[in-house]
Amino acid sequence: MLKILKYSFFDLIRSRWSYVYFLFYLTLGFVLLFLNNDVSKAVITLMNVIIVLIPLIGTIFGVMYYYNSREFTELLLAQPIKRSSIFMGQYFGVAGSLTLSLVLGLGIPFVLYGLLRSNAIFDFTLLLVTGAFLTFIFVGLSFVIAISNENKIKGFGYAVLLWLFLAVVYDGLFLMSLIVFEEYPLDTFSLVATMLNPIDLSRILILLKLDISALLGYTGAIFKKFFGTDLGFLVSMGILLLWTVMPILGLGHKAKRKDF
Amino acid sequence: MGKPNNTNIKLKTPYHKYIPWVVLFLLCQGIWAKTWTICTTCEHSSIKQTIRLANAHDTLLIQKGTYREYEVVVDKPLVIKGVDYPIVDGEKKGEIFQIQSDGVTLDGLFIINVGVSYTKDNAAIRVIRSKDFRIQNMVLEQLFFGIYLEKSSHGKVYHNRIIGEAVDEYNSGNGIQLWYSSDIEVIKNHVQGTRDGIYLEFSDRITITENTSMDNLRYGLHFMFSNHDVYTQNTFENNGAGVAVMFSKFITMKDNTFRKNWGTAAYGMLLKEINDAEIVGNTFEENTIGINIEGSNRIEYTNNDFIANGWAIRVIGACYTNSFRGNNFLYNSFDISYNSKLNDNVFEGNFWSGYTGYDLDKDGIGDVPYRPVKLFSYVVNRTPETIVLLRSLFMDIIDFSERVSPVFTPDNLKDAQPLMKIRS
């Protein structure tokens, strides 16, 4: 598995897209800090970018990579290697290289602009950690979708639809239910609904760490009471981990049964 | 028979002879008012006793040292002046100075340890039913209430420094409190760490200028039932709940700065039942809510700056005939939040950092109106829990579509003449 991981990883590291992705974050980081010069404010802006773009890029990249390396996968399948190692290797290769681009691309400008001396370092670390989680989650989901669909167009369609659902539609449904059931106590409901969607969960996790959380008012106080404690933090990290593990298990399961 | 006549004449003559002496005596009283020096090792070592000995219009000079006294009643017009900030230590036993006469001046004392009480509002300096007083250059620390003006008028509270260490609301007092007082100037004071920095109740025609009120537990400035007051060039920073102006008429607020009143229940300024006020040239920066308006009518908001607030203006209900002109709205999470479909307020010629329109005729005024109420803020007003969707992509999308064609927000709530450039 490690060999395949290494192969996929270095294959991607050498590919143009990784560089584009890396350069994108690098310029984003530099431009933000150049315009703002305030590390903690830049973190807020970055949050907006991260919770929308990372899932999107993770999804598309994952599907693309799977379909593109199909022939190579078939070649590997002919070798005496465990199936799960082949797919796991590819998955970790893709997710790892994307995460590396993210961490380096954002890390370099922030470190140069004095992140280590500012007290935003914890917020920034949290931002990168959730970013990494989102990458792993969405690459995993897209691999599962790609492996279940032979048809590339269909696979792409489902993957984008999945992103659209979690990033936009889910919030819409969430909002609707909040308004429809406004007569009822909604605190627990909104807590649970937030936890179920990795994008919302990351957004709230980061928001609560920033000054802006005061805007959340009464509801925010309840969220803070939950997420602010060590237990709440562990639970939310656990849920992100669960979101990461589930697609991986699904991938292993699918890979074993699939007839190539 | 002649004798009684003689005595009659003799008795009448002395009257006019005394008049010059009386005049001279009165003059002497004015010019040669006695100066008493008080110091710890002098003949007069107690402020209380010296006040008893002194005549009206005398001056008491208090030399450097520590004076352990409380409930010092000033019942005649005296000038009590400290040299090099002598310390008056109340030893937490009760009130320290009580002014009960017109024309008293307190100057340059360092008052500490006012007694905390749950039944009495002990103050470092209390002025009761007096006129023409002057309280200046005082430093008050470890206090309960600071300067308490009760049914007094025509005085001046100038350049004092009040530093409290309030932790809980129930056992702390206000920095400067005016109760049923009028025509008083409160100038250049610095109040911090008390419950309410400056508190006015039933006090009319008060001028509050160039004060700094910060880090107070509750409000930096708190107005109740006080009319015709003016406050200008004050700074209110990092107070528990900002500034509250309630149930008052004809207030003028000019060139004040409201900063960093940040918290789930904090406002830059809270207006409740305020009518006919003028709010001009103020800066609201980094407050959770810049101005929270409730039941306030006929208010002119002109040339204010709203910078980086959560909500710049939050209108809660029943606010009519207000006008917002020439204000700068810069980088607020929400510019205006509004909870009804009816709008009777005018927005005109403001600069909005969120404005994306164009100006083809180059007259400095945008050609498309700006709608400052986001759909999201409307939704949040209806169902507060929806705030958890803050900064989600979905909200940005519906905000955009609402801006293009308003359905939920009041149709006429718009700035038809938004400025293209920031008002400087």
Image (cartoon, coloured by chain):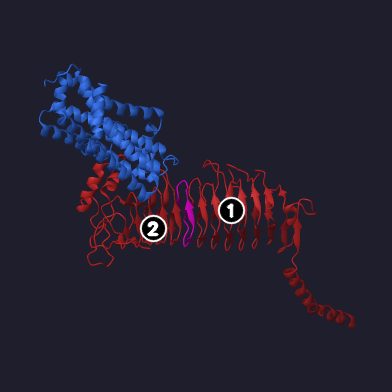
Mark 2 or mark 1, which has the lower sequence index?
1
Secondary structure beneath dot 1 equals strand
On residue A230, the disc is: none
* Pointer 1 chain: B
A107 shown above or below B353: above
- B301 and B271: which is toward the camera: B301
- Near mark 1 (Cα within 10 A), the count class, few <14, some 14-19 or many ≥20, is many
Q: Is residue A168 above or below residue B273?
A: above
Q: Quadrant of the N terminus of chain B?
A: bottom right
Residue B2 located left or right of residue B331: right
Task: State which chain disc 2 sits on.
Answer: B
Q: Which residue type carries mark 2?
A: Asp
Rendering coords of residue A68 (x, y %): 15, 31
Quick one: which residue is furthest to the top in this view?
A: A80
- Chain identity for the colour red used in the image: B
Label 1: which residue? B161
